[in-house]
Image (cartoon, grey):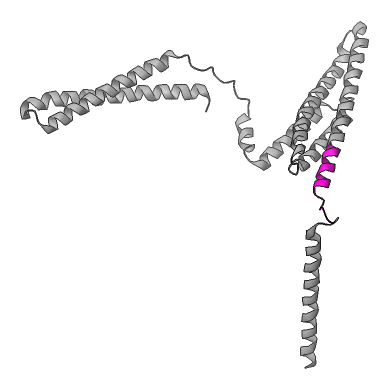
Amino acid sequence: MDERTRYFRQLRRLRNSARRWSVAGGGLAAATAVLTPYAGIGVWDAVWAAAAGGSVALAVWRHRDHRELAAVEPPPAPPPALPGAKLVAAVERFPAGRQVMQEVRRHRERYALRGSAVAKAWDRLDRASSTLQTLAGRLTGPGQEALLEAATAEEWLRDLGQRVAGVERAIPLSPVDQRASLETAHDSLAAQFDEGVEAFERLVAAVAGWVAEDGQPVADDRHPSFFRLIEATDRLRGLAEGLSELRRYGKTA
């Protein structure tokens, strides 16, 4: 729920509450005024009067709160939702749906770069980014800082790649006297993008090296689970041989 909808809902709630307490206060006050002269002043008359006074007081407070809130300028309306935005938001609530939408966006961006000079470097960036995502859950300590740097660098590289592709598409449309300078700027941006992708790949390789070294045991080059697998295999093989011996002994007997 956006802030504008929440504002008008609260305003409507205060108005309805003020109306209800006004009706309740008026009814109780009228009942008190009518019943008191007939039965005299007693305990129940005091109850009626207290209820009437409390209802009137609550009605006054609700009217005051409504006026104060109505005097505040309502929040601006949110931008109109794009077609299918609600469906996309609902799909992205689930991890699998989020991955699917990320893949769809990746293919859409790749399609926009078809035929561009940075298309191959963009594919390398996609592969490096996917590899980094598989390693991200295993990063600890200083590796988390590298992950943040990688996210910032990837955002910059993707923006730069889109910019290079846009400049490249504009070159055939530019005047002849401006085409040379535009081509020079395009070549400079493309070279910068290639260097950035190469640096990103080196960072991913360093992250992979960190994960590999962090997973190595200290005393031996094999994980303890390896030795437990060997022991379990030997036990199962011994049991199988024992069962085989028992079966042969039963046949001879």
Q: Is residue 147 visible?
A: yes
The spot of residue 70 in percent (x, y) is 41, 15
Assign the magenta stretch its main secondary structure.
helix
- Answer with the quarter of the image where residue 34 lies: top left
Q: Give the residues drawn in magenta, as a range.
A: 204-219
Residue 5 percent coordinates (x, y): 49, 24
Placement of 249 over or under 51, stated as above or below: below
Q: Quadrant of residue 137?
A: top right
Q: Nearer the viewer, residue 74 or 195?
A: 195
Up/down of 75 relative to 226, above or below: above
What is the x, y in percent for residue 136?
75, 40
**Above or below 156: residue 94:** below
Q: Quadrant of the C terminus?
A: bottom right
Q: Is residue 216 magenta?
A: yes
Residue at horizontal 15%, vertical 26%?
31
Could you say where residue 229 lies in the image, as x and y percent from the top left?
Answer: 79, 64
Quadrant of residue 178 in the image? top right
Pick the residue in front: 173 or 163: 163
**Which residue ends up furthest to the top in the rendered image?**
177
